Image (cartoon, rainbow, N blue to C red):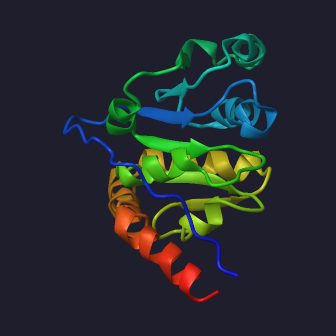
Amino acid sequence: FKSIPNILRPICSYHIERENSILAVGRLNDHLKGFDQLIKVFALLKNKTWVLKVAGGGEESALTLIQLADSLGVLERISFLGKVQDIDYLYSTAGLFVLPSRSEGFPNALCEAMASGLPCVSFDIISGPRELIQDGVNGYLIEDGNLEKMAKKIDDLINSPALRGRIGHNACDIKERLNESKIANDFLDFMLSN
């Protein structure tokens, strides 16, 4: 049995300059999303000039994350944006995307970030990211829970605009893999074969 992925929604592309920012998207009140891990990774970065932007609801949980960031001395470089109306604008302006989840079903935010041309780094969890990312080609998969390795890979990307450009360019191919007509045909093939 082959699983059929979600259809990727159309992504609005803003042709603007990318910022020196790392983006993460998801529900802050969901422990499985791993934002605590991301803040620890961010604190391990050698680069201290980039900022971290976290978009997503669950503001009450942001307090715990704010306390963690403060204790690690990185709070002044992190923005908790809450629910964002125009997420595509954030995808267009970010420098890279990180999925720090402990568990995922089908990670729509990762697909959207890839479709926006963002180089993406994710933990190699049980399902989700490895169906989308070919390690070293269109993104990076990091051993689950290895914060040091994730920090090292993010630093590598920060230090190499050419690498970010190549990985981000390759990531855009996700638009073809997950387009509406292709997924609809996959469903049709599945139904006709059973």
Instruction: Find the residue positioned furthest to the left.
Output: 15
Please, is residue 2 above or below residue 152 in the view? Answer: below
Q: Residue at x 40, y 40 (%)?
A: 95
Location of the C terminus by quadrant is: bottom right
- Taking the image as shown, residue 143 lies to the left or right of residue 45, namely right
Q: Give the percent coordinates (x, y) of residue 74.
A: 64, 19
Residue 153 in view here: no
Q: Nearer the viewer, residue 157 or 189?
A: 189
Q: Nearer the viewer, residue 65 or 182?
A: 182
- Taking the image as shown, residue 35 lies to the left or right of residue 113, namely right
Q: Give the percent coordinates (x, y) of residue 123.
A: 69, 54
Residue 78 in view here: yes
Q: How many numbered marks are there?
A: 0
Please, is residue 54 above or below residue 121 in the view? Answer: above
- Taking the image as shown, residue 66 lies to the left or right of residue 169, namely right
Q: Residue at x 54, y 48 (%)?
A: 108
Q: Nearer the viewer, residue 45 or 59?
A: 59
Figure quadrant of residue 4: bottom right
Q: Residue at x 69, y 37 (%)?
A: 41
Q: Nearer the viewer, residue 23 or 71?
A: 23
Instruction: Find the residue positioned furthest to the bottom.
Output: 193
- Taking the image as shown, residue 32 lies to the left or right of residue 88, namely right
Q: Residue at x 33, y 45 (%)?
A: 11
Q: Give the percent coordinates (x, y) of residue 30.
A: 76, 31
Q: Give the percent coordinates (x, y) of residue 189.
A: 51, 83
Location of the N terminus by quadrant is: bottom right
Please, is residue 176 above or below residue 128 in the view? Answer: below
Please, is residue 139 above or below residue 68 in the view? Answer: below
